Amino acid sequence: MKSAAWFEKFDRQVDNALEHIRDHKLVVIVFSIASAVGDFGLLWHIIGLLRSIGSMDRLSQAFFFSLMIGIESLILNQGIKRLFRRSRPTERGDERFALRKPRTSSFPSGHASSAFFSALVLTYFTTWPWAFLFYGFALIIATSRVGVRIHHASDVIGGAIVGTLMGIIGLVVLNTLAI
């Protein structure tokens, strides 16, 4: 089986597996909110700012973290996505969910990329118990993008990988700058 056909089959299987939960009110609420707070890395900027309360060091971290999220988004949306130009499963997403219409192509998922990028960097700034919360949020946001039919499952996996790799590069830069 050719790789493109394999990805299409995988994406179809995941989409079909999620269909049975798309009508549940709790799923509609969670996926709609998760997709919304993932827009422009909103949740991650808020967490960075909340962490900074009462500490100039953490305020500096929050500033650089927000700057890094912006750079990650720029690289992904203006660089990587333009290489692939993959069509989305639907133009506006599933009508059962409240969504903003995306302006970029589908692969890789920007929400998944920023979520895994942010979870990695925030885990670096904090202690390991926080990693469960950060990666939990990342998984919910990433899954929501497939659930609301704005991304294929392979877009989300690709986004998680890209975000993690960019997070590692970002941490190397942070360590070099001693931030």
Image (cartoon, rainbow, N blue to C red):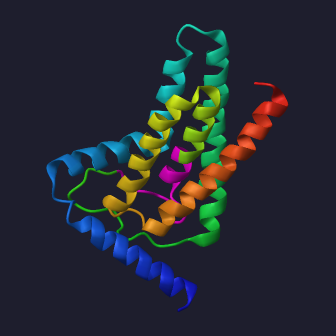
Residue at the image point whose x is 31% and y is 51% from the top: 99
- Magenta-drawn stretch contains 166: no
Residue 78 vs 13, above or below: the answer is: above
Give x and y (percent) for residue 159: 55, 58
Residue 136 placement: quadrant:
top left
The extreme top residue here reads 54
- Asked if residue 172 can be seen in this view, the reply is yes
Residue 84 placement: quadrant:
bottom right
Residue at the image point whose x is 55% and y is 47% from the top: 116
Instruction: Give the magenta range.
Output: 100-115
Labels in figure, total: 0
In-front residue for pair 83/173? 173
Q: Does residue 36 appear left or right of residue 164 in this picture? A: left
Quarter of the image that includes the C terminus? top right
The extreme bottom residue here reads 1
Residue at the image point whose x is 65% and y is 23% from the top: 61
